[in-house]
Amino acid sequence: MQFTSRTSTDGVTERLFTLPGVSGTDGGGVPGVLWTPEGATGPRPLILVGHGGGRHKKAPGVVARAHRFAREGGYAVAALDAPGHGDRPRSPQLDAAVGELRNRMQSGGDVSAAVAALHELLAGQSVPEWRTALDALHRLPDVGERPAGYWGVSLGCGLGVPFVAAEPRVRAAVLGLNGAETSAEAAARITVPVEFLVQWDDERVPREAALALFDTLGSPDKTLHANPGGHGDVPAFELDSALRFFARHLGG
Amino acid sequence: MQFTSRTSTDGVTERLFTLPGVSGTDGGGVPGVLWTPEGATGPRPLILVGHGGGRHKKAPGVVARAHRFAREGGYAVAALDAPGHGDRPRSPQLDAAVGELRNRMQSGGDVSAAVAALHELLAGQSVPEWRTALDALHRLPDVGERPAGYWGVSLGCGLGVPFVAAEPRVRAAVLGLNGAETSAEAAARITVPVEFLVQWDDERVPREAALALFDTLGSPDKTLHANPGGHGDVPAFELDSALRFFARHLGG
């Protein structure tokens, strides 16, 4: 793990890093970013943030969320570019999967199967990458081996569900804006507390599919928050709620 | 409005009162209770709490909730015995409606229509009673004419939906644990912010009916919180959430 820059803004220190290539992935390094409270020393819970489709590790929503988690919760927060996103090359397979999704969206057809295929393709790389990132981040003195959390909706949920199911160090997750087609089998294996976001009028995820994914989660402690509006209209108070959810389950 | 007792416990003052008989109801007085922060003076938002079926104005859940709203939020909180509940006489019509509901529950049949009939019967009395209570409580110097809130689930939702729909002084409501059969028409007329609770494995309210009632609410600002477990298993953190919901919409 190699750090390439360090800056501080509004009480939060941001470090860019590159993970070495992870076996079974595209072979290149994985660009990531770590946020911690400025001047922080000693271990603290780490929250991993998965970005949305077509976005990247420093998308405005990711940065805003990371700043609040670090500044208000005292957490370490990390994000990676998903395979084929941000500063990473796109493979021919990914181009084909994205093309298929675009075609179905333009033709007004059912996109569920195309989204599921895309998420499955990417998760084959992203799950081992997140696990490698967790290994490396937990060795840092200002992160340490405290319980970890995961926040990811939409693509961040599609890739997050198999990651959270596979990774016992993640003890709580905020997920949502995704349907059962993409990850039902992995969702059933999740047992940690989950806060699950649904947009009631989501133009991309059928309401029934989102409710079915919540239903499938194996967690005895899961809570669903549904709000009116489309895929991008999650209200601001849900970020307040996520902070309290992580405080309940990871400590502050 | 006649006060009959005043006691203080844990920083909260409790006053029992009787409202004069309300036209169109059973004609007797309506027993109620008002909680305020001990030593409070001056106006403050009022939260009205509707109790569950077979319970009453001082059921343990109502008292616990009222104490937290008063002590932590600084609110005035009031509850009334619903018609036929607590210290109030049961009418032959109510006995018949409750008997019909019991028969259907024992025979394992669909109880939705019986619940709807019971709620409609009671709401014909309870809506004018709550409105009269609001008139009287708003005249008290330590309550005043600030915006009001309503908290009620199960029967408290069945009676709360037509009340909130009819009463413009109520500016925010926590509702839930009830289905669309009992109040869809009134729900569509509600436009104030609503936090709506669903129990995912509710043995009394079919999941689809609860989701349909949320869907029917006319409020542009509504949020649904669903949690695993049966009708009585609403998790404790939902009370924290209700406090924050009222703080957002009524002020502290």
Image (spheres, coloured by chain):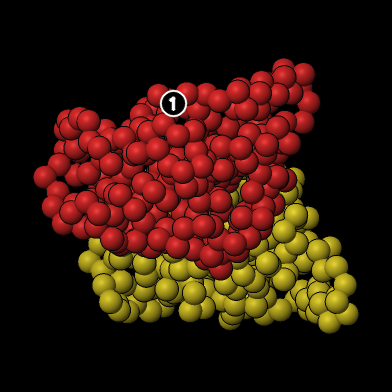
Chain colours: A yellow, B red
Residue at 72 percent across and 59 percent down: it is: A207
Q: Is residue B6 left or right of residue B90?
A: left
**Percent coordinates x, y for residue A116 in the rendering:** 78, 61
Spot the residue most to the left: B39
Q: Residues within 10 Å of mark 1 (few under 14, many from 20)?
A: some
- Amino acid beneath label 1: Arg
- Identify which residue, B244 or A85, lies in the foreground: B244
- Identify which residue, A5 or A215, lies in the foreground: A215
Q: Is residue B67 visible?
A: no
Q: Is residue A237 above or below residue A232?
A: above
**Label 1 belongs to which residue?**
B88
Mark 1 chain: B
Q: Is residue A117 above or below residue B35?
A: below
Q: Quadrant of residue B71?
A: top left
Q: Is residue A63 visible?
A: yes
- Identify which residue, A164 or A19, lies in the foreground: A164
**Percent coordinates x, y for residue A200 in the rendering:** 65, 62
**Percent coordinates x, y for residue A27 in the rendering:** 66, 69
Residue at 42 percent across and 73 percent down: it is: A64
**Percent coordinates x, y for residue A89 in the rendering:** 67, 80
Q: Secondary structure at mark 1?
A: loop
Residue at 15 percent across and 42 percent down: it is: B38
Q: Is residue B23 above or below residue A83?
A: above
Q: Is residue B9 left or right of residue A194?
A: left
- Marks counted in the figure total 1
Residue at 52 percent across and 74 percent down: it is: A57
- Identify which residue, A69 or A195, lies in the foreground: A195
